[in-house]
Image (cartoon, grey):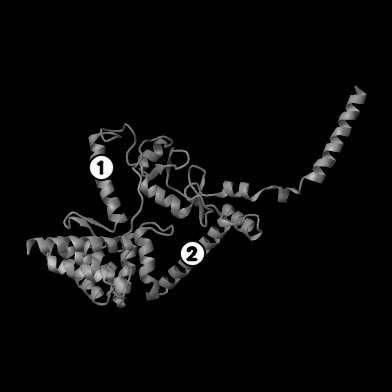
Amino acid sequence: LDNNNDDDDDDDDNSGDESTAKRPRAKHHVGGDFVVKELLCPITRELPVDPVTAEDGCTYERAAIKKHFFANPVTEPTGSSPTSAGGTGAAIGMYEYWRSVLDYVLGGFSSRLGGFSVGVGGERLEQQPPQRGNVGLNEDDLKRNLPRARSPMTQQIIGQTILPAIHVRNTIRHLIENDVIHGDYADAWKKGMETKQMVEDYVKRADEGDISVMWEVGQWHFHGRHGFDVDKKLGFQLFKKAADANDPKGMASAGSCLVEGWGTTPNICEGFLLSGIAAGLGSDLATWNLACWFHFGHVTVEADREKAMYYYSKVIDGSCSVQHLNEYLKSNAKTRLAKLQARALSTA
């Protein structure tokens, strides 16, 4: 027995020597790929630039999890009433919910127009059907009616509170600076950090009254981009400041808000006036809005096919010197113009 114990001790000593000789130091042993997988945002599959921790315990990119919460709210507890999942009341409630989603995503949905109006930017986002249930919610949460959503990782229902994950942010920065993480993930993170710095700079300049960035920052607040909460009121205020300084982009977006009542009390006359001035100054967004209003008619404007064709043609012929309309809506203008022209020829 003593000899066996001595042999075991010798083996242990030898194995220790071999492992020391063959195995690198611990700080080099952890592979970059393994570290990356642990730090990736589950939604974007990228290293988060602005990491936050949600109530499910997972870490996400701030903008990504906020977009997920917006697209996947839980509106009623399961089985609480006839409006629970699958009921007729739920369908009516969800119609109103998705109507508001379209107002936000596409810049405004107007049944009066018979189609979509670009609003202040024509944002288009992929949306997922809302999920329902009360798994993971306690009684106090339900009584307070706190905003909640389904976790993208656990599928449990959680609150929408998020907290900055400072330790994760510092870890990622340290690993990239020391070349533990490199390649495409590191390059994307560095680019994201540049964007984050640009956003912070623009916000600071807007706060100081710089009109050249006012409209852009207004867009971020109005649509909830770059991790900002959707705040149409603040977005309109920034648009109006830019408009008051004769900025065509600010005039176009403020005009849309005033006509449709987004983030402010509706003032159709002032809205049309600002839109007309912005179009005259070369804004393709304002020109698009005028085309839509004359195409389908509005509260105070009768449909006018000739004027609609005139404004649609200006959107697509390159004559607008201030370009801030997205490509999807420019293509839409081309399609609408072709249909109106074909209709005009058929009735000539």
Pinpoint residue 331: horizontal percent, then vertical percent: 28, 62
What is the residue that sits farthest to the right in this orientation? 3
Q: Which mark is residue 93?
A: 1
The residue depicted at 44 percent of the width and 52 percent of the height is 64
Side of 63 where 299 appears, left or right? left
Pinpoint residue 235: horizontal percent, then vertical percent: 33, 64
Pinpoint residue 305: horizontal percent, then vertical percent: 13, 65
The residue depicted at 48 percent of the width and 64 percent of the height is 195
Write down the residue under mark 2: 195
For this rendering, which residue is in front, 263 or 201? 201
Q: Is residue 321 above or below residue 134?
A: below
Q: Quadrant of residue 19?
A: top right
Dot 2, how many residues are within 10 Å of its Cα: few (below 14), some (14-19), or many (20+)? some
The quadrant of the image that shows the C terminus is bottom left
State how many labels appear: 2
For this rendering, which residue is in front, 124 or 246? 124
Dot 1, how many residues are within 10 Å of its Cα: few (below 14), some (14-19), or many (20+)? some
